[in-house]
Amino acid sequence: SYVLTQPPSVSVAPGKTARITCGGNNIGSKSVHWYQQKPGQAPVLVIYYDSDRPSGIPERFSGSNSGNTATLTISRVEAGDEADYYCQVWDSSSDLVVFGGGTKLTVL
Amino acid sequence: QVQLQESGPGLVKPSQTLSLTCTVSGGSISSGSYYWSWIRQPAGKGLEWIGRIYTSGSTNYNPSLKSRVTISVDTSKNQFSLKLSSVTAADTAVYYCAGYSSGWYCEYWGQGTLVTVSS
């Protein structure tokens, strides 16, 4: 089955740029979606189709996907961005949805 | 705006069947190309996709749970449901219902409901 690998944690100072990676075999050939989840809340879609932002998501959130790594980039990080972030793909070969293990973003 | 709401028992005994229902409001469950899904999250852990159903009735399940899972849809009530049999403490989690677009990103999430498996 298809596996997505994320770093368990990423730390960044306010105002700096955070990059959260999502690794998978030839992930560049798939569409990657990213969710933000704050404690006690349901996840929220922040990036879809690798780099598109839903309405209401700040332009500070961006995404890229190439080769074996997709990346969620958060520019000018704010305290309110502290959350868990999950990448997700649909594996067409198995018709299954796959989540990465999640990355806890800590704002120092 | 489409909204999803989970309902069902918050406590299930070991070996019994967990049953949850998701009510879709603000739109018809049959309209559009949405895949209605269940996702769970044990405390302090990541998201696990359980399975999905299309309004045609077509289903697919996570292989790790496939032998115990059934997802069904009732279009007359604008609901879809989850049944998970032979539960153990490992099935204790927050269960989310969700609506996936045809592009396989989750547009709609329920608020989640905690189900505890305990005698």
Image (cartoon, coloured by chain):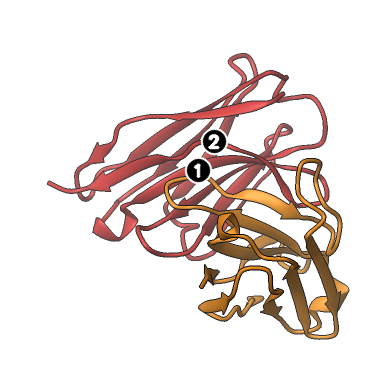
* Colour-to-chain, red: B
Using the image as rendered, state which of residue B55 and residue B110 is in the foreground: B110
Q: Secondary structure at mark 1?
A: strand
- Per the rendering, the mark at residue A40 is none
Residue at 50% from the left image edge and 43% from the top image edge? B96
Residue B16 vertical position relative to residue B48 in the rendered view, above or below: above
Inspect the image, locate mark 1, and give the three-letter code of the amino acid beneath it: Tyr
Residue B42 in the figure: left or right of residue B119: right
| Disc 1 from disc 2: Cα separation | 6 Å
**Label 1, residues with CA under 10 Å away: few <14, some 14-19, many ≥20:** many
Residue B100 vertical position relative to residue A21 in the rendered view, above or below: above
Horizontal arrangement in the rendering, residue B79 relative to residue B7 (left or right):
right
Q: Position of residue B113 (x, y in %)?
A: 40, 38
Mark 2 secondary-structure assignment: loop
Of all chains in the rendering, the one displayed in orange is A
CB contact under 8 Å: marks 1 and 2? yes
**For residue A49, side relative to residue B79 (left or right):** right
Disc 2: host chain: B
Of the image marks 1 and 2, the number of the one nearer the N terminus: 1
Residue B96: which disc? 1
The 10 Å Cα crowd at callout 2, few under 14, some 14 to 19, many 20 or more, is many
Q: Which residue is mark 2?
A: B110
Report the residue that reaches farthest toward the front: A15
Q: Quadrant of the N terminus of chain B?
A: top right
Where is residue A75? Give x, y as percent. 75, 67
